Image: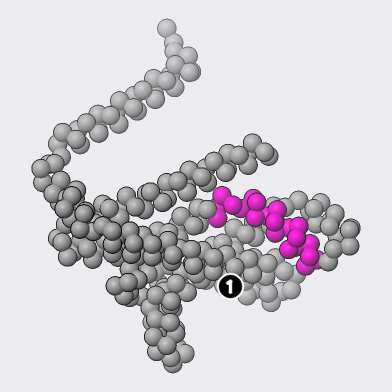
């Protein structure tokens, strides 16, 4: 007797679940927990890392992410509007900027701003704010290029009728953009901007290439140095858990926003 389509789908799902459970059981039974436990889940090392990994590593990571996100958002708005401008040179400048910083690896941009820029302008890096500031500037440039395209797509998704209605009421083009188009466009791009925040949170780990001080270590650098000093992987596991504690609620919030906006549409 032939199976119905729904029955085949159920059978397929059950088979996948069975395979995944079998793999999990196999890993649990074959792993050398007596060796892995002290190396990666050592309570003594974990207690030693607290509260420093939170007060220094996590706090710096969140601080750097917030600065890079806000700076990237402001620059992104500017370049998004320039790319949508009717003035040709504005569009060309915005296009070159966006394609340049989207095309280069983030780590290369951070390295260039931290070390090549001071040489180019003939000013020591410490006089330009030091490695942390220069590294953040590089991260802001990368973030703004990606945000500019996201913002531009959101603004262009606003129905033309909204603009025409505002203009018919006597609003100037600039007032229409700032009071009608941008607020509605940002409502559309909140989910992708939240994803950008999550990506920036992880990209702060690239700031190590610019050099850091003891007080300015972000989460990954703090965990790496602590792991090296203790010859133990527990700090890396702690850093991973802290990243997940921050990123999972954000990604779930983004998914909820997308579902809600889909229902409204």
Q: Is residue 209 magenta?
A: no
Q: Where's residue 143, x and y in %? A: 51, 65
The crowding category of the residue bearing disc 1, from other C-alpha atoms within 10 Å (few below 14, some 14 to 19, many at least 20), is few
Q: Where's residue 8, x and y in %? A: 43, 19
Image quadrant in which you'd find residue 86: bottom right
Residue 189 shows up from this direction: yes
* In the displayed structure image, the side of residue 245 where residue 149 appears, left or right: right
Q: Where's residue 157, x and y in %? A: 69, 52
Farthest residue to the bottom: give it: 122
Image quadrant in which you'd find residue 228: bottom left
The kind of secondary structure element at disc 1 is helix
Q: Residue at x 42, y 50 (%)?
A: 247
Q: How many marks?
A: 1
Q: Residue at x 44, y 92 (%)?
A: 122
* In the displayed structure image, the side of residue 123 where residue 94 appears, left or right: right
Q: Nearer the viewer, residue 104 or 188?
A: 188
Q: Where's residue 50, x and y in %? A: 26, 57
Q: Nearer the viewer, residue 81 or 125?
A: 125
Q: Residue at x 39, y 20 (%)?
A: 11
Question: Which span of residues is magenta-colored?
Answer: 173-193
Residue 101 shows up from this direction: no
Indicate the quadrant containing the C terminus: top left, top right, bottom left or bottom right.
Answer: top right
Q: How is the image coloured?
A: one colour
Indicate the quadrant containing the N terminus: top left, top right, bottom left or bottom right.
Answer: top left
Farthest residue to the left: give it: 34
Question: Main SS of the magenta segment?
Answer: helix
Please tell me whether residue 242 is drawn above or below residue 123 in the rendered image: above
Q: Is residue 184 magenta?
A: yes
* In the displayed structure image, the side of residue 196 where residue 110 appears, left or right: left
| Residue at image mark 1 | 96
Please tell me whether residue 71 is drawn above or below residue 235 in the rendered image: below
Q: Residue at x 58, y 73 (%)?
A: 96
């Amino acid at each position: 007797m032939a199976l119905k389509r729904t029955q085949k789908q159920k059978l397929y799902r059950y088979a996948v679940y069975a395979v995944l459970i079998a793999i999990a059981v196999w890993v649990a039974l074959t792993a050398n927990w007596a060796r892995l436990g002290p190396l990666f889940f050592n309570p003594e090392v974990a207690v030693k890392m607290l509260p420093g990994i939170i007060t220094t590593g996590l706090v710096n990571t969140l601080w750097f992410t917030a600065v890079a996100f806000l700076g990237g958002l402001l620059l992104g708005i500017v370049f998004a509007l320039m790319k949508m401008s009717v003035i040709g040179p504005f569009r060309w400048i915005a296009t070159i900027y966006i394609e340049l910083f989207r095309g280069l690896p983030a780590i290369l941009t951070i390295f260039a701003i931290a070390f090549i820029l001071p040489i180019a302008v003939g000013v020591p890096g410490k006089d330009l704010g030091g490695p942390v500031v220069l590294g953040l500037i590089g991260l802001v440039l990368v973030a703004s290029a990606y945000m500019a395209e996201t913002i531009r797509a959101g603004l262009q998704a606003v129905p033309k009728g909204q603009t025409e209605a505002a203009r018919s009421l006597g609003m100037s083009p600039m007032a229409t953009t700032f009071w009608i188009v941008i607020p509605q466009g940002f409502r559309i791009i909140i989910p992708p901007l939240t994803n950008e925040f999550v990506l920036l949170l992880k990209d702060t780990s690239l700031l190590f290439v610019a050099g850091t001080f003891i007080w300015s270590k972000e989460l990954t650098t703090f965990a790496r140095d602590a792991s090296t000093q203790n010859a133990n992987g527990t700090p890396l596991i702690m850093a991973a858990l802290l990243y997940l504690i921050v990123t999972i609620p954000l990604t779930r919030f983004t998914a909820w926003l997308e579902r809600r906006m889909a229902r409204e549409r």
